[in-house]
Image: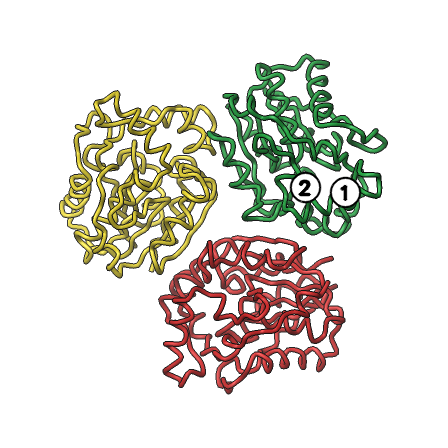
Chain colours: A green, B red, C yellow
Amino acid sequence: MAVFVLVHGAWHDGTGWLETARHLEARGHRAFAPTIAGHGKGADKNVTHAQCTQSIVDCVAAHSLSDFVLVGHSFGGTIISKVAEAIPGKIRRLVFANGFVLRDGHSLLDEVPPYTAAAFEEIAKQSGGVSMLLPFPVWRETFVNDADLETAQRLYASLSPTPLQPCRDRLDLKKFYALETPRSYINCTEDIALPPGEFGWHPRMSGRLGLYRLVQMPGSHEVMHTNPALFAEKIIEAGRD
Amino acid sequence: MAVFVLVHGAWHDGTGWLETARHLEARGHRAFAPTIAGHGKGADKNVTHAQCTQSIVDCVAAHSLSDFVLVGHSFGGTIISKVAEAIPGKIRRLVFANGFVLRDGHSLLDEVPPYTAAAFEEIAKQSGGVSMLLPFPVWRETFVNDADLETAQRLYASLSPTPLQPCRDRLDLKKFYALETPRSYINCTEDIALPPGEFGWHPRMSGRLGLYRLVQMPGSHEVMHTNPALFAEKIIEAGRD
Amino acid sequence: MAVFVLVHGAWHDGTGWLETARHLEARGHRAFAPTIAGHGKGADKNVTHAQCTQSIVDCVAAHSLSDFVLVGHSFGGTIISKVAEAIPGKIRRLVFANGFVLRDGHSLLDEVPPYTAAAFEEIAKQSGGVSMLLPFPVWRETFVNDADLETAQRLYASLSPTPLQPCRDRLDLKKFYALETPRSYINCTEDIALPPGEFGWHPRMSGRLGLYRLVQMPGSHEVMHTNPALFAEKIIEAGRD
């Protein structure tokens, strides 16, 4: 029996893990899926990356969790890197699921294609620079390319604007890069939320982890919705000793 | 119910889509698989790329088709790019299936490895430079690597020399690159008709499409023969809204 | 009915092919899995690459084999390249299974990341530079990433230190690169024994084969243990005419 703490990505909140968590629990594991500070519908989007990290650390403390597998999806990868710095002794293994593995001193926006970073800032102007939502056509083609239109629309309706400051914050990751916590990378082979190649997930992000375990599966960036059963299986493969 | 217009690649003609079309129709769709001008056994191989394009435009007009998904396989990718320029209003979505997405001003031969372009021209000398057929050993290893020898031989017998001028013609694609027609890329993961890497299909060709949907499946360049059922399924996934 | 000669990689010996050979034979083929000189528990590890090669040539002669498919896994790829130079007329096809395809004049250690080569030499110091065993954590994460811990431990216990001189020997491969023996490359898509990208297996090693057939399957570097049934199937696909 393992304990999984599942950290969502941008635009999402903890409820996005519902089906995956159900599959994990059906296989005898425990799963927690907190919502990151500033994320989710109705949340105050004025948050920093440090506040986001702290909210996950607080959740871990509130549930007295230890010896757990910490999973970070997409933007959540930047969170679990900093959570690992804060409470390294509590984490059995880190699992980045098409997660950002930032270089020391970089922000998430430093790591996406320049035209993407510019587009994010442009859209954020509507909220005075605080938050932004990906336009549906971009999300439909590059995040849920394996879903039908109805599913894509339903999922899109569950999203909310993501706070942008945590994506701008440049992170000191020296401690993270000195940690010896075991780590895995799950790569979904049809995930083009980052464009394959120069700016791609794998092996660009995964390769920064040093010694790591690779797990792959078919699917888009939103496999927790389009194939939660297989995703849960791969999280187990990635998370075991 | 969707309408698919399937445009074949070099050495092939419309009959190569027979089984794939059958699977599409069995799932409630309509499929048209015209033969490009200058292609197929017995055809006059003295054609230009413009004539090839026109022959598909004519087929669309003859059947009064509109709001269809236009699929281009391999060389057919260069054709659908120009058809999209000619009749953009009739096309619901473009699907490149390991299809060439040429840079503006380039020919197909500009985009394959230099030794491949040279070999094509060398073989074409036998026909006064008009057409050429890939030698069986090259085709067997790099086009139908997922078939047994008997299947490979049977399929090879169905091929005919491909007109070379359409592969030499440099295409003005400025209009294509300004179109907002939705587009998808199907990549078969064992397709080495173009060598993976510097000269590969994906993400080199796919990445030129700007905002696009990626669909992948196992298989070689000839999946319409070696796995038409799954290929039809992936065409549907790639072609839907 | 085909005859397969299966050449293992570093740390392994011929017994590692047992299950794969059983699957090949269950499908009507014959399989031989010799142990390379200097390899296996209790062997004298003071061997050169030439002696390794000779031991496979000798095994072929002892069994009077001809017209066989010669499969080389990992380090075994360097062996089959030299065996092919020694007895080209006896080999129907070469199959590199995540095998090293060295550039002419290179050693295996010239082709792995510099930090890996340095680590190998460092570990080998314990045996006066003669042999070395990969530490379990490295092997578990990058060689058997698709196995559970128990399986990984059981397999690790079957390994023995690999002689290092054959990995240091720079090989004259001019004759190999002039051979016209048909060749295939099997790539396991989760094999990160070489890190994907600049130092990866595919398309870096495969692309050196010139005209070759690509066969892929899911799995780690140790698929002969973690999925021998599918591996046998892929060896058959790779080895057929």
The residue nearer to you, when weighing B131 against B129, is B129
Residue B58 lies, in percent from the top left, at 67, 82
Residue A186 lies, in percent from the top left, at 56, 36
* Circles 2 and 1: CB atoms closer than 8 Å: yes
Dot 2 falls on which chain? A
Say which amino acid is labelled 1.
Answer: Leu
Q: Which mark is residue A155?
A: 1
Q: Which mark is residue A222?
A: 2
Crowd tier of the residue under label 1, counting other residues whose Cα lies within 10 Å: few below 14, some 14–19, many 20 or above: some
Residue A15 lies, in percent from the top left, at 76, 31
Residue extending furthest toward the right: A42
Say which amino acid is labelled 2.
Answer: Glu
Q: Secondary structure at mark 1?
A: helix
Crowd tier of the residue under label 2, counting other residues whose Cα lies within 10 Å: few below 14, some 14–19, many 20 or above: many
Q: Secondary structure at mark 2?
A: loop
Which quadrant of the structure image shows residue A5? top right
Residue B23 lies, in percent from the top left, at 62, 63
- What residue sits 31% from the left and 38% below the top? C17
The residue nearer to you, when weighing A106 against B203, is A106
- What residue sits 77% from the left and 31% below the top? A39
